[in-house]
Amino acid sequence: MNAMPDRPLTFLCITTYEKGQEFMRECKRQGCRVILLTAEKLRDAEWPREILDDTFYLPEEIALADIVGAVTHLARNHKLDRIVALDEYDMETAATLREHLRIPGMGLTTMRYFRDKLAMRMRALDRNVRVPDFVPVVNHADIRYYLDHVPGPWVLKPRQEASAIGIKKIHAAEELWPLLDQLSDKQSSYLLEKFLPGDVFHVDSVVSESEVVFANVSKYGKPPMNVAQGGGIFTTFTVPRGSEEDSGLRAINRDLIAALGLVRGVAHAEFIQAHSDGHFYFLECAARVGGAYINEMVEAATGINLWREWARVEVAGGDGSYRLPPVREEYAGVILSLARQDDPDTSSYNDPEVCLRIKRHHHAGLVMRSSDPHRIPTLLEGYARRFAEEFLAVEPPRDKPTA
């Protein structure tokens, strides 16, 4: 039963957002059959239909048990070898299906460490990875003790949302209790954490057989929570290789991936360097490719496409055949803004470092590349000022993700 089949592997790719096209293309290049399971609302999205062997669409608000039933029915005629969630919000579906059909890959227990902010913090803390002081929003006596002993401000975070969605900053203890009353029976789906002012970094990794075989360390211009909740220009850029930030975060990231138990795939982990003490603190980690064109930035700097390598790691499975391609050690950055214009014109941003102009409805964005570690942050600083004047639009913070 454990031998590799002498037929092409069949991948079931699940996503309720329009993403992962390069993952599917790479699976096909590796000789696999590719089946896409996506949302009905994305029927007309730009999927790589020329390489898909079949596509199935899910109606809105379908229950997980019904998805299990539908995929089990599908498995009668398709021998499924891999089930992959291309988006964070589909990880529970994929893990449930793997366990029900006994298909190799991340199960529900490990999945929690990449979806549940409380689970990942407790696991990291157990393995001596530094995290901001936190308390589960369960026992009110514990919460009162925490508020009395951990100075504010604090942040109230949904345990299973991505990015900064649904996060509320709290400055005084009396602000918290009315919020918990509003949440009622849902309050246990949140955690309370000390707010740490600092610089936020992200490490984007490829993991094969529990080993981090590739990592790229980058720094956000403004913390993503500030951009998401207050509006503004999103920027991120590669940190100087060999710097204290680069080497320190690579080491912490290796420990974190080992603690969370990722066997193979990709990871996007975020850390904050606190202004108060200079230490790095773990914020969150997702077993997915980072959004906001981070993949394009990483590829510009290193030549490594995270979607492509994720597919190659999954195809190799546990047979030890995966090899990382040669890595280029340059520097890159991305700038992205919600734009007032329907189709903003970025042609006046014509420095030779610009290597990609992002074409997206009501967004202005660029990816830049340079061999000089200091050139990209300098460019981003000037570009951000110009973007604010020429393009920037601001919308209210979202309580739910959008496709």
Image: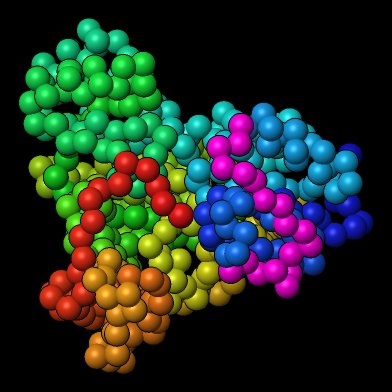
Is 50 colored magenta in this rendering? yes
Residue positioned most to the right = 6
Q: Is residue 112 left or right of residue 386?
A: right
Task: Name the residue located 24 percent from the left edge and 31 percent from the top edge.
Answer: 156
Any part of residue 20 in sight: yes
Hey, which quadrant is residue 218 in on the image?
bottom left
Residue positioned most to the top = 141
Give the dominant element type of the magenta stretch: helix, strand or loop: loop
Is 49 colored magenta in this rendering? yes
Task: Name the residue located 20 percent from the left edge and 60 percent from the top edge.
Answer: 394
Task: Name the residue located 57 percent from the left edge and 28 percent from the top edge.
Answer: 109
Q: Position of residue 322 (x, y in %)?
A: 67, 61
Q: Is residue 383 left or right of residue 335?
A: left
Q: Closest to the observer: 231 or 58?
A: 58
Instruction: Point out the stretch of residues depicted in magenta.
Output: 46-63
Pick the quarter of the image with the N terminus: top right
Q: Position of residue 219 (x, y in %)?
A: 27, 61
Q: Closest to the observer: 325 or 14?
A: 14
Q: Is residue 123 left or right of residue 368?
A: right
Up-down relation of residue 314 to residue 75 (above or below): below
Any part of residue 213 in sight: no
Q: Position of residue 214 (x, y in %)?
A: 50, 61
Give the tally of numbered discs. 0
Up-down relation of residue 341 to residue 155 (above or below): below
Hey, which quadrant is residue 116 in on the image?
top left
Q: Position of residue 271 (x, y in %)?
A: 30, 47
Q: Is residue 329 left or right of residue 176?
A: right
The structure's colour scheme is: rainbow
Task: Name the residue located 78 percent from the left edge and 48 percent from the top edge.
Answer: 81
Q: Closest to the observer: 402 or 78?
A: 402
